[in-house]
Image (spheres, helix red, strand yellow):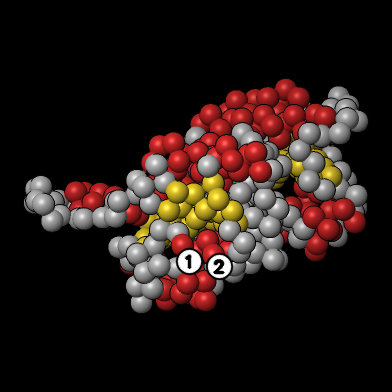
């Protein structure tokens, strides 16, 4: 055996990434792509020097309590890391990294895709065409809601929200409002042509489209609850490409049923891949299977970024994207 670091990879990755992993490390690939349960994760933590993990791996304090703990780094494939208990990782001396930046544009595209799909009733239309139920053009067929020129409300103003703001302003002539407890510097806000609001309530009250771009933390859990859904305009749409936990899914179902809001475009769910079955029956909802970063180019870039973090760590250098 060479002295190469052993890296356990929890899911299948694009071929170029797996090939690079095999060149750089003693890589243990997950060829059948079955998500690992707690016992599988613990086995990996016990035997590998590092894990290349992702959003489907729940790396809790209990999982990290494994003995002996061999792994010294969790290189997460993805920007969000709410599935990893960072405090427990710190306590156990395990470094955690993520893959920011490389997925910004794709995730912003995803948010915009949902916005357009739900407002223009694209899902309904597609279902109708596929079912052979389309009888031809008519002036009153599937009338949706205009997106151009409307008000977009961003909850959070990090990289992805800024990329959404750019699309909204430059491509769709939208007015952009936002709230972020840690707002970007004034020159960035000015460049985006966005306007800060003092609270999430102010944003949801004024926006025609509310798009969520905050991380999932204990503070943002159910940030969009029944009360805030009631604050939204009856004609407004909710877009979630952040994390399912940010929205109280039951409250959303109730609001959609009661037509408190006009519709929702969802890419993420509280208990994904499970979701409230009622969502699937609603025409005013667009449901995507967590596709934010799902392009060939971006998934390769995410993998290469995770490899860069692992290589830095094993060479004794500080990994670029350390979050714990
Ligand atoms: C991310 O990068 O956080 C994506 O949602 C995939 O986990």
Q: Is residue 82 above or below residue 194?
A: below
Q: Is residue 60 visible?
A: yes
Quadrant housing the N terminus = top right
- Residue nearer the viewer, 214 or 16: 214
Q: Which mark is residue 236?
A: none
Q: Is residue 199 above or below residue 20?
A: below
Q: Is residue 57 above or below residue 271?
A: above
- Mark 1 closeness class: few <14, some 14–19, many ≥20 residues within 10 Å: some
Left or right: where 9 falls relative to 231: right
Distance of label 2 from label 1 (alpha carbons): 6 Å
- Give residue 91's position: percent from left, percent from top: 90, 56
- Give residue 45's position: percent from left, percent from top: 81, 49
Q: Which residue is mark 2?
A: 201
What element does badge 1 sit on?
helix
- Residue nearer the viewer, 286 or 160: 160
Q: Which residue is mark 1?
A: 205
Left or right: where 300 falls relative to 313: left
Left or right: where 56 falls relative to 258: right
What element does badge 2 sit on?
helix
Q: Is residue 36 visible?
A: no
- Mark 2 closeness class: few <14, some 14–19, many ≥20 residues within 10 Å: some
- Residue nearer the viewer, 167 or 132: 167
- Give residue 260's position: percent from left, percent from top: 38, 73
Left or right: where 233 falls relative to 194: left
Q: Are marks 2 and 1 in contact (CB under 8 Å)?
A: yes
Location of residue 235 (image quadrant): bottom left
Residue in the picture at 50% in, 39% down = 166
Location of residue 222 (image quadrant): bottom right
- Give residue 255's position: percent from left, percent from top: 41, 73
Instruction: Say how many tags the image has.
Output: 2
């Amino acid at each position: 055996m060479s002295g190469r670091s052993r890296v356990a990879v929890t899911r299948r990755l694009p071929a170029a990434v797996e090939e690079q992993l095999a060149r750089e490390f003693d890589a243990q690939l997950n060829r059948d792509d079955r998500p690992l349960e707690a016992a599988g994760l613990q086995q990996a933590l016990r035997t590998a020097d590092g894990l290349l993990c992702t959003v489907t791996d729940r790396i809790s304090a209990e999982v990290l309590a494994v003995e002996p703990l061999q792994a010294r780094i969790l290189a997460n494939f993805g920007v969000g890391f709410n599935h990893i208990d960072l405090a427990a990782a710190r306590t156990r001396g395990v470094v955690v990294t993520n893959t920011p930046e490389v997925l910004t544009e794709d995730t912003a595209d995803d948010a915009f895709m949902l916005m357009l799909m739900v407002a223009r009733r694209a899902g309904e239309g597609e279902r109708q065409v596929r079912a052979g139920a389309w009888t031809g053009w008519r002036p009153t067929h599937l009338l949706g809601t205009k997106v151009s020129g409307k008000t977009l409300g961003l909850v959070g103003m990090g990289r992805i929200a800024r990329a959404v703001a750019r699309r909204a302003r430059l491509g769709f002539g939208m007015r952009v409002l936002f709230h972020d407890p840690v707002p970007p510097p004034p020159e960035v806000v000015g460049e985006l042509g966005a306007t800060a609001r003092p609270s999430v309530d102010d944003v949801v009250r004024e926006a025609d489209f509310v798009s969520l771009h905050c991380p999932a933390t204990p503070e943002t859990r159910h940030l969009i609850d029944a009360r805030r859904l009631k604050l939204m305009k009856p004609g407004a749409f909710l877009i979630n490409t952040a994390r399912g936990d940010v929205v109280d899914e039951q409250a959303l179902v109730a609001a959609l049923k009661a037509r408190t809001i006009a519709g929702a475009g969802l890419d993420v769910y509280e208990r994904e891949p499970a979701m409230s079955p009622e969502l699937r029956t609603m025409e005013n909802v667009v449901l995507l299977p967590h596709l934010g970063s799902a392009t060939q180019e971006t998934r390769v870039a995410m993998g290469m970024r995770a490899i860069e973090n692992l290589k830095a760590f094993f060479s004794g250098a500080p990994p670029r994207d350390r979050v714990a």
